[in-house]
Image (tube, rainbow, N blue to C red):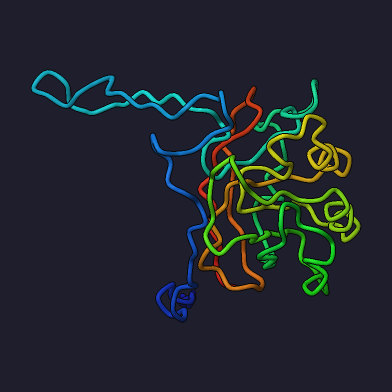
């Protein structure tokens, strides 16, 4: 009986690592939240010392802090919590569309140039420098979300705090997300990301009763 060696490709034989863009803002005491929502706070619970082998902090903050994924239950009673949603929309090919200087709302004409052969995920860059401020930001017009939904996307993201204006009470764009079963990412940082196609990785935590989850969102070149 003869033995035969099996050859496997070396993990080091691959070409250079694919470039990664970190599209998540810092999360700390300076992170902006919706007026009245819980601010980020951190305190040392266990301190490394002769009697304790580790540091352990206690964190308190809104799940809408920093880059985050809204759950359907955020805008619909009885809908799914973030820990129950499918992870597939948060992982895979996506397109970054530049719609800078689009004003208070991203309208269909602002994204019309980039809709051919659209992948299942779309991220909208609305500003040269992303801001988490709730004072003045660009949201998404319902007509734009309806257009994207007609392209069979699974997720939309934006580099502002919300897909609806801060003063909105009826949240039409959020309810279009619900109607079309779309997932959403808010508070992304797309400042240095050229328009084009990437791989998105932005998995929410398995928070079984939460209306949102922070994500560490990245883009990776294809």
The residue that appears at 73% across and 58% down in the rendered structure is 121
Q: Quadrant of the C terminus?
A: bottom right
Residue 2 visible in image: no
Q: Percent x, y for residue 166?
A: 68, 37
Farthest residue in the left direction? 50
Farthest residue in the right direction? 150
Rendered position, 39 above or below 181 = above
Is residue 28 left or right of 115 when viewed as pictured?
left
User: What is the number of callouts on the image?
Assistant: 0
The residue that appears at 61% across and 59% down in the rendered structure is 200
Residue 106 visible in image: yes
Is residue 134 left or right of 84 when viewed as pictured?
left
- Which of 180 and 163 lies nearest the eye of the viewer? 163
Q: Percent x, y for residue 58?
A: 36, 23
The residue that appears at 83% across and 52% down in the rendered structure is 145
Q: Percent x, y for residue 194?
A: 58, 73
- Which of 111 and 9 lies nearest the eye of the viewer? 111
- Which of 142 and 82 lies nearest the eye of the viewer? 142
Rendered position, 37 above or below 133 = above
Q: Quadrant of residue 120?
A: bottom right
The residue that appears at 78% across and 52% down in the rendered structure is 154
Is residue 25 left or right of 89 when viewed as pictured?
left
Q: Percent x, y for residue 141?
A: 81, 50
Is residue 170 left or right of 208 when viewed as pictured?
right
């Amino acid at each position: 009986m003869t033995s035969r060696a099996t050859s496997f490709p070396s993990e080091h034989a691959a070409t250079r690592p694919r470039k990664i863009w970190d599209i998540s803002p810092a999360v700390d005491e300076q992170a902006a939240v919706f007026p009245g929502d819980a601010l980020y706070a951190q305190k040392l619970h266990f301190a490394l010392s002769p009697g304790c082998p580790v540091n352990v902090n206690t964190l308190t903050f809104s799940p809408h802090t920093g880059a985050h994924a809204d759950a359907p239950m955020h805008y619909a009673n009885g809908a799914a919590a973030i820990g129950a949603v499918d992870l597939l929309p948060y992982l895979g090919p996506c397109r970054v569309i530049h719609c800078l200087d689009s004003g208070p709302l991203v309208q269909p004409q602002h994204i019309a140039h980039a809709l051919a052969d659209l992948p299942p995920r779309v991220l909208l860059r609305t500003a040269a420098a992303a801001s988490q401020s709730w004072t003045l930001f660009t949201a998404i017009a319902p007509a734009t979300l309806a257009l994207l939904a007609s392209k069979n996307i699974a997720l939309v993201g934006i580099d502002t705090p919300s897909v609806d204006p801060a003063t909105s009470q009826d949240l039409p764009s959020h309810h279009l997300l619900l109607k079309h079963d779309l997932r959403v990412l808010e508070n992304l940082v797309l400042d240095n990301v050229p328009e084009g196609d990437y791989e998105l990785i932005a998995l929410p935590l398995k928070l079984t009763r939460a209306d949102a989850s922070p994500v560490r969102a990245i883009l990776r070149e294809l």
